[in-house]
Image (cartoon, rainbow, N blue to C red):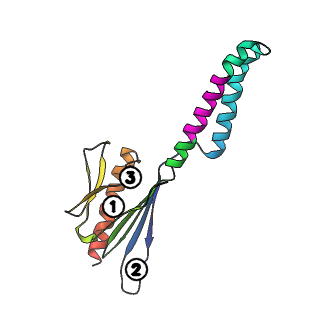
């Protein structure tokens, strides 16, 4: 799953805290990227062997180059968006959520953990996971699959309950 909980043991005061890290799943690793671009270039070049030495080659070459550049650019952009990360810190006093997006300033939300509720609702995606403290509602893990958001919601509700009981 593209998230992990880090549970820290109670400190001297008996405070329980959790940290959650979420990131988007990428099915094509960097090594796979190199193979994909290479195989695509070879497969596109094979039919062009028939037109080597003719004027037709020069007519087709810009389109081949544009196709390879488009694939390269699109995959690189996908990797940059995959650097998004959400970090949620939860203890008996506060909940801090920080979203790191490439090329943007970090977005931070801090509230009293006692009042926070995690819930699934209808939204821009199926099983939209939100956190609310009664004043403001924020999304969490919009890049996760619906099954992952449901599992995360259950875990988050359980951990919020643990933190409330430790108060």
The residue shown at (66%, 34%) is 37
**Does residue 105 show up magenta in the picture?**
no
Task: Tell me the quarter of the image containing the C terminus.
Answer: bottom left
Whichever of labels 1 and 3 marks the residue nearer the N terminus, that label is 3
Question: In the structure shown, which secondary structural element does the residue marked by tag 3 occupy?
Answer: loop
Q: Earlier in the sequence, mark 3 or mark 2?
A: 2
Q: Are circles 1 and 3 on residues that touch, CB within 8 Å? A: no
In the image, residue 88 lies at what x, y percent?
39, 64
Residue at the spot of label 3: 141
Which secondary structure type mostly characterizes the magenta part of the structure?
helix
Q: CA distance from mark 1 to mark 3?
A: 12 Å
Residue 163: x and y in percent read 31, 72
Q: CA distance from mark 1 to mark 2?
A: 18 Å
Q: Position of residue 14 (x, y in %)?
A: 36, 83
Q: Residue at x 38, y 73 (%)?
A: 17
Label 1 CA crowd tier, 10 Å (few <14, some 14–19, many 20+): many
Return the residue found at the far left: 134
Give the numbered dot on residue 156. Answer: 1
Circle 2 SS class: loop
Q: Secondary structure at mark 1?
A: helix
**At 40% from the left edge and 45% from the top edge, which residue is drawn?**
145
Q: Residue at x 67, y 17 (%)?
A: 59
Tell me, yes or no, whether the highlighted magenta stretch contains residue 63.
yes
Residue lying farthest to the bottom in this orientation: 12
Q: Which mark is residue 10?
A: 2
Q: Is residue 43 visible?
A: yes
Rendered position, 127 above or below 164: above
Closest to the camera, between mark 1 and mark 3, is 3
Quadrant assignment, res 133: bottom left
Foreground: disc 3 or disc 2 = 3
Q: Position of residue 56 (x, y in %)?
A: 71, 13
């Amino acid at each position: 799953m593209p998230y992990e909980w880090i549970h820290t043991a109670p400190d001297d005061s008996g405070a329980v805290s959790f940290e959650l890290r979420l990131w988007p799943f990428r099915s094509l690793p960097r090594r796979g990227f190199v193979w994909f671009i290479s195989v695509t270039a070879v497969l596109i070049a094979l039919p062009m062997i028939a037109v080597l030495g003719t004027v037709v080659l020069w007519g087709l070459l810009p389109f081949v180059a544009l196709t390879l550049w488009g694939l390269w650019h699109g995959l690189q952009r996908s990797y940059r968006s995959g650097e998004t990360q959400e970090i949620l810190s939860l203890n008996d006093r506060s909940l801090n959520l920080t979203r790191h997006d490439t090329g943007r300033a970090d977005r931070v939300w801090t509230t009293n953990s006692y009042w926070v509720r995690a819930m699934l609702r209808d939204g821009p995606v199926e099983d939209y996971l939100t956190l609310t403290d009664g004043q403001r509602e924020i999304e969490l893990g919009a890049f996760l699959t619906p099954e992952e958001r449901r599992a995360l919601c259950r875990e988050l509700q359980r951990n919020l309950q643990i933190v409330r009981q430790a108060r």
